[in-house]
Amino acid sequence: MPTRAAPSVPVMRMTATASQAAPTTPLVVVGAHLHGEPLHADLLGLGARFLRATRTAPVYRMVALPPVPGHPPLPARPGLIRDPAAGLAVEVEVYELPVAALGELVLAVAPPLAIGTVALDGGGQAPGFVCEGYAREGVPDISHYGGWRRYRAAHHGAHPAERPS
């Protein structure tokens, strides 16, 4: 007999595919995977489908992580750090992702980012991009912008480490 999940815990939903039902899960994205950002195509390549734009619960700080050279290089991206005592709400997008693709995504996420539970405005929560707390050291806190796009717009799309001196 199936057990019922707690109301605030995300429950996988079955959605129809061409020939069979495949389990999916919501996924909260915060920065480089947002529509129009550099890693959005990677998200779509995993079979993600946009559900809605929303905000987090007001329990997060957002920091600007610098680009990371390497193979492949990582663009500048935000880090969403849970801080109930001093947090704010942040703009996010929620996608529906095949469960099988979630494992692939988890393996591709570079530290200090990770996939964890993101509390959403209105009381729900879902898996999404979060950041380990140690990452806030030495990087700008950009929480007051309210979201990654607003931060990027205010800085003409460039992370401070990307702008010429």
Image: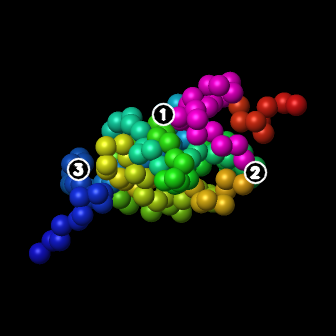
Q: Relative to residue 121, is residue 69 drawn left or right?
A: right
In the depicted view, which residue is nearer to us: 69 or 21? 69
User: Which tag, 1 or 3, sits closer to the chain's start?
Assistant: 3
How many other residues sit within 10 Å of disc 2, few (<14), some (14-19) or many (≥20)?
A: few
Whether 31 is drawn above or below 152: the answer is below
Q: Residue furthest front?
A: 85
Q: Determine which of the numbered discs, if any, sits on residue 21 in the image.
A: none
Q: Which amino acid is tagged 2?
A: Gly
How many other residues sit within 10 Å of disc 3, few (<14), some (14-19) or many (≥20)?
A: few
| Residue at position x 78%, y 39% in the image | 161
Nearer to us of marks 2 and 3 is: 2
Q: Residue furthest bottom?
A: 1
Determine which residue is flagged by label 2: 138
Determine which residue is flagged by label 1: 35
As for residue 141 lying within the magenta part, the answer is yes
For residue 98, say whether it is visible: no
In the depicted view, which residue is nearer to us: 91 or 71? 91
